[in-house]
Image (cartoon, rainbow, N blue to C red):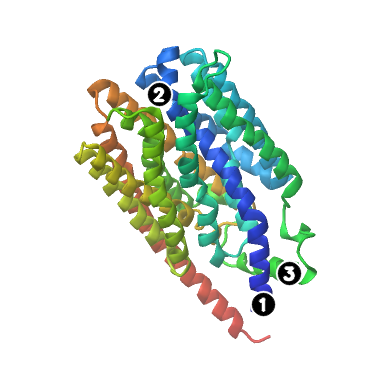
Amino acid sequence: MNTSIEKRTIKKVGLRLIPLMLVCYLVNYLDRINVGFAALHMNDDVGITATVFGWGAGLFFISYFLCEVPSNMALHRVGARRWIARIMITWGIVSTCFAFVQGPISFMALRFLLGVAEAGFFPGMVLYISYWFPQEYRGRLTALFMTAIPLSALIGAPLSGFLLETASFWSIASWKWMFIIEGVPAIILGVVVLVYLTDRPSEAKWLTPEEKDWLVSKLSVEKTGGHLSSFKDAFKSLNVMLMGVIHLGFAVGSYGIAIWLPQILKGHGLSSFHIGLMSMIPYGVAIVGMIAWGALSDKSPNRSLHVAASCLLGAIGLLIAAAVPTLFGAMVGISISTLGVIAARPIFWTLPGSFLTGSAAAAGIAFINAFGNLGGFIGPYVIGLIKDQTGSFTLGIVATSLPLGLSVVAALILAKRLARLRAGAATNTAKFVQEPS
């Protein structure tokens, strides 16, 4: 292998694609969780209870689940550039429409439509990374791309808090301006994606012929052993089902806390602006940890063990937050939990490429994400329901830690299965090399 070509090609592809993908995902995640900040004022203005808010916040993930696989198959067929642009423009339009919420029905309807519009974006990005980067680079590069999650909080939390306290023009409520100001960038970025992205390495005019040939050849070699390739194979694979369970567990914990964190902090007597500042802390901790953990996983023969460890850390953090009912205890526990569940994500999403390719990858990644994102419905709804029944967030936080324990078990089972798969692929390669020509 010509290491000079390898380094040059990976650097060029990474610098061209990852920064734009990161910004797009940052805006995506911001538009997904800003409803938690809007609720500080919106719920009282339009008459939304904690249970209704939890239900509506989670309803996004039901429509997301229903549309996820069809959306990713469409991306695989028509190309990432056009389909991701379509997703971003439509979700940006729906997000700005939240400024017109009048009550529970319109709130829930728009949350459902937002899930329809956004379905396929994240799994499409994961699939797109597998088109461009060899397996040994995906952990750190996926981690860089997914720093958008903590960055969206580091930027979006104080921005949302600031807008809620200051953006009240022409007799329009500040929470409405927040939805408009934070929704428009998705529409603009959708147009940028349409112009800037390239669907496949073979179409990259910005690579030299030598760089293009190396990358296409390298990616082709990776798809020769132990990979499922057909649409039906993805839904028959126990590995896919295990990954769905793992994702469900950390989605319950991460989205449950992300949606309710502003109101948890409000219970400690903080203003909207200070809630925004305090919400930055868990994500500041997570952004450092996820990059370091992603790079470490690239050196490990079994990434699934890293996923199990990070999910365990996420569960422990939630239990700490529930056990120590002070502002300090809540911030320490939620910071530990956020580090765990966010560090799990980039490592987790490198795994499908180790056993899926082609249509199976498009369908399998979409199914894993769709099934797991049902946790985004369960987490906010359970916390809201328990809050209405008990008047406290404590039992709701404990409840969201339990699925993370299930994720740990599923990750350990997956680790054993993928280890056997790698051993079988290595044996087949050795036999092929030893066979006489």
Location of the N terminus by quadrant is: bottom right
Q: Is residue 380 above or below residue 219?
A: above
Foreground tag (2 vs 3): 2
Q: Residue at x 32, y 43 (%)?
A: 334
Amino acid on which the number 3 mark rests in the picture: Glu
Q: Please state the horizontal and vertical placement of residue 126, each as a whole percent of the image.
A: 57, 51
Q: Is residue 42 above or below residue 196?
A: above
Q: Earlier in the sequence, mark 2 or mark 3?
A: 2
Amino acid on which the number 2 mark rests in the picture: Leu
Classify residue 264 as left or right of residue 11. Answer: left
Residue 51: image tag: none
Q: Please state the horizontal and vertical placement of residue 206, each as a whole percent of the image.
A: 77, 60
- Graded by Cα atoms within 10 Å as few (under 14), some (14 to 19) or many (20 or more), the crowding at tag 2 reads some
Quick check: can you spot residue 327? yes
Q: Residue at x 61, y 49 (%)?
A: 21
36, 367: nearer the viewer: 36
Classify residue 172 as left or right of residue 345. Answer: right
Residue 4: image tag: 1
Q: Please state the horizontal and vertical placement of residue 183, each as a whole percent of the image.
A: 59, 30
118, 363: nearer the viewer: 118
Q: CA distance from mark 1 to mark 2?
A: 54 Å
- Disc 1 on helix, strand or loop? helix
Q: Earlier in the sequence, mark 1 or mark 2?
A: 1
Location of the C terminus by quadrant is: bottom right
Which residue lies under the disc numbered 3?
A: 211
Contact (CB < 8 A) between labels 3 and 1? no
Q: Earlier in the sequence, mark 3 or mark 1?
A: 1
Q: CA distance from mark 3 to mark 1?
A: 10 Å
Q: Is residue 245 above or below residue 157?
A: below
Foreground tag (1 vs 2): 2
Which residue lies under the disc numbered 2?
A: 40
